Each structure stands twice: as C-alpha cells, then as structure tokens.
Amino acid sequence: MPAESHCKIASFIWSICNLLRGPYKRNEYRKVILPLTVLRRLDCILAPTKAAVLKEHAAIKTKGDNIKLPGLTA
C-alpha cells in the first residue's frame, strides 16, 4: 500500500474517532472501530459473489430449511 493511501486511510479513521469522541471515551474507540473495520473488510471480500448469493437466495427462499441451508453453504 502506498504511503499516501495509508495516510488517507489513517486520517479517515481518526476523523471517525473524532466524531465518536462525544458518546465514547478514548479507550472505548476500539469497541466500535475494530468491529466496523472487520465488517467493511468482509463486505469487500464478499462483494464479487454478492449478486450470485442474492440470486440463489431469491430462488430458494420459499423452500424449506432442509433445502435452503445446504444450498447456501455449498
């Protein structure tokens, strides 16, 4: 990752910390920032397959659980 990109990401995260400063104490930031960072990373990783998963879910959503669960985990 280029240094400029890293600095932009770091300053973005710190700007979020500044927004949270009101309801959260400084030592509580990690309780919010880390889970949101993990969720965003998962969203980025799963983005290429999202359309296929939603299409498959639409096709089997009215079927029973014994058909749904194996179809979505395969």
Image (tube, helix red, strand yellow):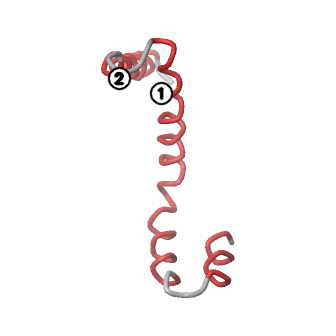
Categorize mark 1 by other alpha carbons within 10 Å: few (<14), some (14-19), many (20+). Answer: some
Question: Disc 2 marks which amino acid?
Answer: Ile
* Disc 2: which residue: 16
Image point (67%, 69%), residue name: 73
Asked whether the residues under the numbered discs 1 and 2 touch, taking CB atoms below 8 Å apart as contact, a structural biologist would say yes
Image point (50%, 19%), residue name: 28
Q: Is residue 37 above or below residue 17?
A: below
Question: Disc 1 marks which amino acid?
Answer: Ile
Q: Is residue 59 above or below residue 57?
A: below
Image point (51%, 62%), residue name: 49
Tell whether 1 sits left or right of 24: right
Camera-nearest residue between 11 and 16: 16
**Number of marks drawn:** 2
Q: Position of residue 24 (x, y in %)?
A: 41, 19
Tell whether 72 sits left or right of 48: right
In the rendered image, the quadrant that contains the C terminus is: bottom right
Image point (46%, 75%), residue name: 55
Q: Quadrant of residue 67?
A: bottom right
The label on residue 23 is none
Q: Position of residue 53 (x, y in %)?
A: 51, 69
Alpha carbon of mark 1 to alpha carbon of mark 2: how far?
A: 8 Å
Tell whether 26 sits left or right of 72: left
Q: Position of residue 41 (x, y in %)?
A: 52, 40
The residue most toward the top is 26
Secondary structure under the numbered disc 1 in the rendered image: helix
The residue most toward the bottom is 63
Categorize mark 2 by other alpha carbons within 10 Å: few (<14), some (14-19), many (20+). Answer: few
Which of the two discs, 1 and 2, labels the residue nearer the N terminus?
2
Q: Quadrant of residue 23?
A: top left
Camera-nearest residue between 72 and 6: 72
* Disc 1: which residue: 33
Q: Position of residue 15 (x, y in %)?
A: 33, 18
